Amino acid sequence: MAKSKTQSNVLPMSEVFHPGIETYKQVYNESLEKPDAFWEKQAQVLDWFQKWDKVLDESEAPFYKWFPNGKINASYNALDRHVNRNRRNKAAFIWISENDEEKIVTYDGLYLRVNNFAKSLKDLGIKKGDRIIIYLPMILEAPVAMLAAARIGAVFSFVFAGFGAGALAERMNDSKAKLVITADGFQRGGKMVKLKDIVDEALVQVSSVESVVVVRRGRNDIQMQEGRDIWWHDIVSRKQIYVEPEWMDANDPLYILYTSGTTGKPKGAVHGNGGYSVWVANTMKWAFNPQEDDRWWCAADIGWVTGHSYIVFAPLFLGLTSIMYEGAITYPGPDRMWELIERYRVNLLYTSPTAIRTLMRYGEKYPEMHDLSSLRVLGTVGEPINPAAWKWYYDIIGKSNSPIIDTYWQTETGGFMIAPPLGLGLPPLKPGSGTFPMPGVDPVILDENGIEVAPGEKGFIAYKRPWPGMFMTLNNDPERFKRTYFEKFNGMYYCGDYAIKDNDGYFWLLGRADEVLNISGHRLGTIEIEDALIASHEVAEAAVFGRPDKVKGEVIVAFIVVKDQYEQDGEIVGKLRKKIRADLGPIYVPEEIHVVKGLPKTRSGKIMRRVVKAVALNEVPGDISTLENSASVEEIKDAIEGFRREASN
Ligand code: WTA
């Protein structure tokens, strides 16, 4: 496989930031050599009600059990212990909306809200083990609902507020949710998103849901269904109520988060209470080295795993103060992010390469309008960061004073897997490399046959041993869990990324090796979009793939064949766009939809997506000896050329 071209790009930052990586090396080696003793110690970052029987039970691998029989509660660790100690009046969240409303909630205030909502959930009949859906924008009720569920042992599944009714219904059905928490609507980029209407549409396809709790946020008109829908403010008491936190087993589920894979059906990754909590708290310390009085801003949406782990759980476990921002980072202007950093004296910023590239396009004048001197550490997540964006972030935003913490991880991994270990000693950074594995993480780069490749060669990244934050299973589908992640490389964990380990031992994450797309750092399934297209009665066949894009990393391109009777329909592309937006959500809408007469297929009738993509991207399509209809290749070329001509006019 190809050699990496990016390896010589070294900045001598160890001199600037840290004396060296000796501590990291020592801690890392200890984590692999004496894992039991190591994790025994690390687990003490949290308070446990009862100690575990052993650190790791591998008897039913790959269904690993960390800290079995240990009893813990995530809400207790996020709140009670801070309130009981000296953080009662410390801000947990400083929340700001797009229109500059501001709310500061202290640990005590959050504790009060969580207890009160936990009581409301109990009053609605929610018990330990019940599943609830949270479909909320970036408002304080989101972490309150998550922590209240965790407090009483209900398993929540957060659905990103950008998903459409079809995607929402699918998640409600798969999780067999009894209750949904949503809002009437919210503003994004100045526009109203009518969340409750989407819930109503989804519920037509769902039978398990008994109640819908609605937060008043958008103040838009909505329908409240008698006996099912209740306002949040009508059921939450203003008095101080105490709800005893459930003693959860370390391996009882905390939440289910759906993510895209290589089939049309999203996978419900199940995270547990114990190992996951230990993992997010420790990885945050190791990668970002946060200090007591720091202000942390994770600019992700709470509905994705980044928000779960690093807006809600890790920062609260560590007793930090977070900025929580409800809105677009370019609204009302391209300096929004820089303005908020200045106003709130943010110390640690964590965002995505797409956000950096988007803001970079507006030029330096916007960050230069603001005092960014409070920033000390800059993080990124979600997709590979190209060296140009890395350098802009480092030079212009960090004024060459703040290390870039490029964190590589996945929904399934719970927390960071590969990231510069600032808290343990920072190695010299190389723009575009996440540097080294976190303690306990044992990665290897393999070829198709599972043989380790030489340094500098591209291969599949896999992990030789489990780590505490690893998801426990897929909801309703343990077989798929085993098959998808552990079969390809003989029991090692594999989840679809290419990587290189260079001669200095640095890891370079190169993106997906499978049919999963990464659009602006959002993980979407090719087949999900193809299925949605084919589900509309006009479309006979569809092939979807990602085209590289300078800002978003990738954008979605679809080639479709329309059924004969709709061939003359000039509105078809617009209709399909609308349908995908309503069903899956706006992020799924293809940038380009090309209508063609046929798609390249094998003789057995399978669409050759690989060939469509190669031809459309002007690449060599590889082996096409099994191709049945070569005329379609010419048609794809013509369609793309026509599109380019139009775009350049
Ligand atoms: C990609 C997001 C390169 C990768 C936390 C992975 C990255 C997928 C990075 C997971 C990074 C995430 N460098 N690629 N720093 N971080 N990815 O589950 O392809 O939404 O498999 O979790 O994003 O996306 P997910």
Image (cartoon, grey):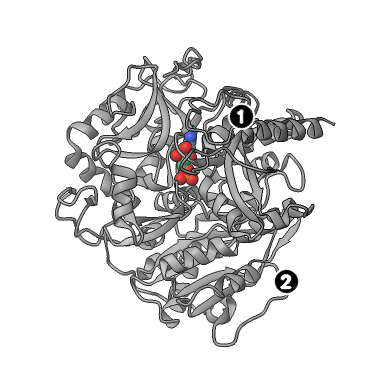
Asked if the beta carbon under badge 1 is closer than 8 A to the nearest atom of ligand 1, the reply is no
Q: Residue at x 41, y 41 (%)?
A: 284
Q: Residue furthest right?
A: 649
Q: Residue at x 26, y 58 (%)?
A: 251
Q: Quadrant of residue 450?
A: top left
Residue closer to the observer: 181 or 28: 181
Q: Residues within 10 Å of mark 2 (few under 14, many from 20)?
A: some
The amino acid sitting under disc 2 is Asn
Quarter of the image that includes the C terminus = top right
> What is the count of numbered marks?
2
Using residue 380 as the reference point, say whether residue 38 is left or right of it: left
Q: Is residue 586 above or below residue 600?
A: below
Mark 1 to mark 2 CA distance (whole Å):
47 Å
Q: Quadrant of residue 463?
A: top left
Residue 292 percent coordinates (x, y): 45, 44
Q: Is residue 170 above or below residue 426?
A: below
Q: Is residue 325 visible?
A: no
Residue 599 percent coordinates (x, y): 60, 40
Residue 615 bears which disc, if any? 1
Q: Which residue is mark 2?
A: 220
Q: Residue at x 55, y 32 (%)?
A: 611
Residue 500 percent coordinates (x, y): 40, 23
